[in-house]
């Protein structure tokens, strides 16, 4: 798998319980460094799955977030900690965003300056903010190479 200097290539897959679709799979992936919403730089890896029918078009997005400088290891996911994950689905203008309340992030390969590669797995339970609705992400797997040139907006679906 090769990536140009200005794009990310790879794939992100998972089984979802109570998500948009029972199977999440996409090659529409992005890997970028951001500093929003927290002041310290962190990596965001996101996969976006598009469902063109029925209209209006819907999307699902699966993301993991971890601090810059993170090394390959196993990390515990929390809602407001350094290691986080999210799952969002809906229309571009009205996504439902579920934030991980617990789970595990395993990084086999972690990105670093000059070597933007990411490989790992993720499983988590997520809750819709101000609601009792939950989503379970199981068997999450991701492999990405290359940087997306600009910072990503956390938890954002795009057309």
Image (cartoon, rainbow, N blue to C red):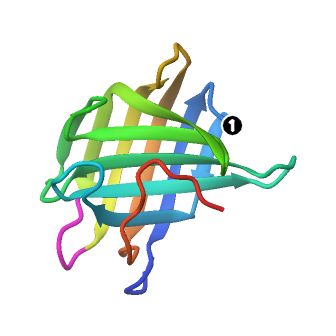
- Say whether residue 149 is left or right of residue 51: left
Residue at 27 percent across and 29 percent down: it is 78
Quarter assignment of residue 80: top left
Secondary structure under tag 1 reads loop
Q: Secondary structure of the magenta portion, mostly?
A: loop
- Say whether residue 105 is left or right of residue 25: left
Q: Tell me residue 88's x, y (percent).
A: 55, 40
Residue at 23 percent across and 59 percent down: it is 110
Residue at 36 percent across and 67 percent down: it is 151
Relative to 29, does residue 63 appear above or below in the rendering? Answer: above
Relative to 111, does residue 44 appear above or below in the rendering? Answer: above
- Say whether residue 104 is left or right of residue 29: left
Relative to 54, does residue 111 appear above or below in the rendering? Answer: below
Q: Tell me residue 148's x, y (percent).
A: 40, 73
Q: Which residues are magenta?
A: 110-115
Q: Which residue is mark 1?
A: 21
User: Farthest right residue?
Assistant: 54
- Decide whether residue 114 is among the magenta residues: yes
């Amino acid at each position: 798998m090769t990536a140009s200097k200005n794009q990310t290539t790879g794939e992100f897959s998972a089984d979802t319980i109570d998500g948009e679709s029972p199977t999440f799979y996409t090659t529409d992936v992005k890997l970028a460094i951001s500093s929003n919403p927290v002041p310290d730089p962190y990596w965001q890896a996101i996969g976006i799955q598009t469902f063109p029918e029925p209209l209006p078009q819907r999307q699902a997005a699966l993301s993991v977030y971890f601090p810059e400088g993170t090394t390959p290891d196993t990390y515990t996911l929390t809602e407001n900690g350094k290691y986080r994950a999210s799952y969002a689905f809906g229309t571009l203008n009205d996504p439902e965003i579920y934030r991980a309340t617990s789970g595990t992030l395993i990084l086999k390969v972690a990105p670093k300056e000059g070597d933007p590669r990411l490989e790992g797995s993720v499983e988590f339970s997520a809750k819709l903010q101000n609601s009792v609705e939950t989503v379970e992400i199981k068997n999450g797997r991701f492999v990405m190479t290359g940087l997306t040139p600009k910072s990503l907006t956390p938890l954002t679906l795009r057309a």
